[in-house]
Amino acid sequence: MSEVIAILENVGKLFPKAKKSAVEDVSAQIQTGLVTGLVGPDGAGKTTLIRLMAGLLAPTSGRLRIDGGDPIADAARLRENIGYMPQKFGLYEDLSVEENLTLYADLRGVIGAERETAFKRLLDFTDLVRFTNRLAGKLSGGMKQKLGLACALLGKPRILLLDEPGVGVDPISRRELWKMVKDLVAQGMAVVWSTAYLDEAELCGQVILMNEGKLIFAGVPSVMTERMNGRCFLIQSCQGSRRQLLTRALRRPEVMDGVIQGHSVRLVLRKGAAAPKLSELQAGPECVTTPVASRFEDAFIDALGGGPGGESLLAERMRSIPGPKETVIKAGNLTKKFGDFAAADQVTFSVARGEIFGLLGPNGAGKSTTFRMMCGLLAPTSGTARVMGIDLAHSASKARQRLGYMAQKFSLYSSLSVLQNLEFFSGVYGLRGAKQQTQIDEMVEVFKFGPFLDVTPDTLPLGFKQRMALACAVMHEPDILFLDEPTSGVDPVTRREFWTHINGLVEKGVTVMVTTHFMDEAEYCDRVALVYRGGIIAAGTPDDLKQSVASTNNPDPSMEDAFIELVGRNEPVNG
Amino acid sequence: MYYRIKTLVIKELQTLLRDPQGRRLLIIPVFLQLALFPLASTLEVTNNTLAVLNEDGGSASFELIQRFSHAKAFKETLTLQSEDELRQTIDQQKALVVLRFPPDFSRSVAAGRPVMIQAIMDGRRSNGGQIAFGYLQQILQTYLDERDVATSRIPISKVVVRHWFNPNLEYTWFVVPSLVAIITTISTLIVTSLSVAREREHGTLDQLLVSPLTPGMIMIGKAVPALLVAMFQGTIILLGGIFIYQVPFQGSFLLLYASMICYILALVGFGLLISSICATQQQAFLGVFSFVMPAILLSGYVSPIDNMPVWLQHLTWANPLRHFILIVKSIFLKNAPAAVVLQSVWPLLLIAVATSTTANLFFRKHVV
């Protein structure tokens, strides 16, 4: 039943002027009746590979065959058989759902009775029937993706190429999209689903795992995950700081990788290594070790040669921030209205010194609005936002001197060199002379910027930019760090490295407020607030949130389970 | 505080000057405009066609036609035969002006009787027509004066024209000083408003706003580089005007540069105002153009302000370009004393204060 519909043979793509190939020597097969996951962090070459398959780019080496033809030479024939949904699907925001569909039907030559049946089929399938007259711009992220999918499915393609359909979609809509895609493959279609979320790989029938343009693995994902069986375990009920425990564990040679998971620490061992004794980790007498299921991400880290280690050179060099454990960030009934729409509604929380506080929620839930009000970038319609007792929107610049801020898009000056950026940001925070030089030198040393000082950051990979942004945010040794989606799109190794630094800084007394839509990132937080539709629907430690939705069917729910369940409970009436 | 502003200014200059393309963009357009503007925006009327329907045929009309057709404004003279042909000539824009001599023209002139020449001009080219007509009138006057001398008749009165400050009415003398003003206008506006919009687009503005910098410091940080760039470009035009186009510089450089600073400050206010209400660079660019076009139109560069309706004349007071063009021309050509220049400088300072205060308010409001 399943047949090979696409063959990639040693495919490579080198863009003009680029030093490195975007895609290098990739060989893989894509079968009908399966979801093929094209998995890898940003910059892995996923989009390039999809565009090669769609016939929008010509390979510089190797060969592609789609449905027995060359994607470019046989474009006219293949166009009928390939459905392609780019990362930002070209929906016209000012046209309604139906008008968008009509436009794409016209473009694809789907007319007459065929169009009517196709529309009915797709609208039923995507459950958009009720919204045919709504403007595409007014749809939620998930609905937009569904509409994009419907447009890509016009004309019944045999192979569907989806470029990061899960981005900007809340976990609930993401599950719905997956269900739809599974229905499609059950009908015999081949679906390529590209994603930066490694957990999605486990849902695929087959994966093509890439990193920095190179193929790491192609095949059934469980084959890769199984390699890690017996190497993953959880250290629970430990005393003292779990962050320090993680650092100690990662120091040991037998530990390949480790992350914080709520109150616990999850460790992955090197192949053939025995687990370190709990006493050696000084984890406390009540501590227990439980073996846990391996994940695709563990295998990915393993394939890259292990995690980044647990020491933060950055934190070592930072000063300790003394002071009692008192509230330093406080939001009281914080509300922001844009017209009738309340982007944030009566948001209340407080964060104590030395705590990591996370705002977790899908795009558009209101976490960015809340975050921006807290840093003084947006004036609240009502309510208060206080940092160290000061309202930052009207504050003296003295208070802002004690903040560090790192934005989602890594707002560095792309026209300045790495060194000029460091000089500028330290200068803005009033560092000068010898002090400025020492701080810059330390950042260069800690983050190994040495070879890149004269390069502009826009030419460097995302992980590097992320390090740069962190360096610029902490050079003046702030008391409080505001992080807005700090690891969006970066590879898991860089993400771990980042959190190692944050953990180290927190141990020194820095307070961190972070927004994220990554469930595993929420696990690093001391406390998490779930933001949905402008309000906080639940708050507590990650373990509390998970426990609150535990049931007999699901005794050990994941953060995503908790999220979906808690959102479901707060949905007024489903529909 | 000064150190932080210095940091901002250095950053801004590094941004502008880091890549060769950016450096070229600051210089090449200036040279291009210096080369093109004075040649292209000529106010003289030359290379046109004169058409004549001569129903007379006498010596007076013949001589006049000879003189007319040698005027600088006309390269070619068409001789028409009929009224139909005359209509066609104007219809098809074959000639800018048609002159029609009545049958008794020469006889009347000889007899000393008053006589008329009909001049028909193409209203579609009203400005050029009027200027050409002015030339024709001058020629006619000279002819009549000479006749008076020849017949030893003493004219009742005579107007002698002298053009002060530009005796030969060299149009480059008019264009170059204005160009100093126009180029500085465009570059100041683009440097200020686009750089703020770019920071907004890239998210770096947020980064600045959460830092200890105040909106005021950020604005000064944008104003100073714009000032430096505009002064630099203004100087290029100034030197080009003096050494290439040989426009005599009569006044004081000190006075010119001092008022240039005031002018640029007024413009920076407008630039920041534009950028504070624009979300993207594209919007800012359109914003700059929707400011520059009316500013040039209402500056007196294109047409004299006195010709505009009174309410519009009042409106031109808010246009910094109007004041600065006046200042540059009077310093450049007239060596205007400081007291006179000051009369145009204080409106500039007023505009600078008003716009930058509003921009600062908008800036805070838009941001917060």
Image (cartoon, coloured by chain):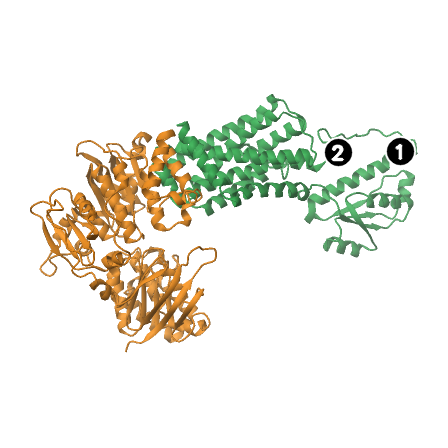
What hue represents chain A?
Answer: orange
Residue under label 1:
B148
Q: How far apart, in angstroms, are the residues tagged by discs 1 and 2?
A: 26 Å
Cβ atoms under marks 1 and 2 closer than 8 Å? no
Coordinates of residue B159 in the picture (x, y in percent): 79, 30
Q: Earlier in the sequence, mark 1 or mark 2?
A: 1
Quadrant in the rendering for residue A418: top left
Number of the front mark, 1 or 2:
2
Question: In the image, which disc is placed on residue B168?
Answer: 2
Instruction: Count neighbours of disc 1 (C-alpha within 10 A) and say few if under 14, some if 14 to 19, many if 20 or more.
Output: few
Residue ID at (64%, 38%): B303
Coordinates of residue A12 in the picture (x, y in percent): 41, 64
What hue represents chain B?
Answer: green
Residue ID at (18%, 43%): A244
Q: Is residue A365 above or below residue A388?
A: below
Q: Chain of mark 1?
A: B
Q: Quadrant of the C terminus of chain A?
A: bottom left
Instruction: Count neighbours of disc 2 (C-alpha within 10 A) and say few if under 14, some if 14 to 19, many if 20 or more.
Output: few
Residue ID at (81%, 48%): B100
Q: In this orientation, which residue lies closer to the viewer: A237 or A518?
A: A237
Coordinates of residue A172 in the picture (x, y in percent): 23, 58
Residue A72 located left or right of residue A517: right
What residue type is disc 2 on? Asn
Coordinates of residue A206 in the picture (x, y in percent): 27, 67
What residue type is disc 1 on? Asp
Q: In this orientation, which residue lies closer to the viewer: A68 or A400?
A: A68
Residue A303 can be seen in this image: yes
Q: Is residue B354 above or below residue A32?
A: above
Q: Quadrant of the N terminus of chain A?
A: bottom left
Residue A425 located left or right of residue B346: left
Q: Chain of mark 2?
A: B
Do callouts 1 and 2 point to residues on the same chain?
yes
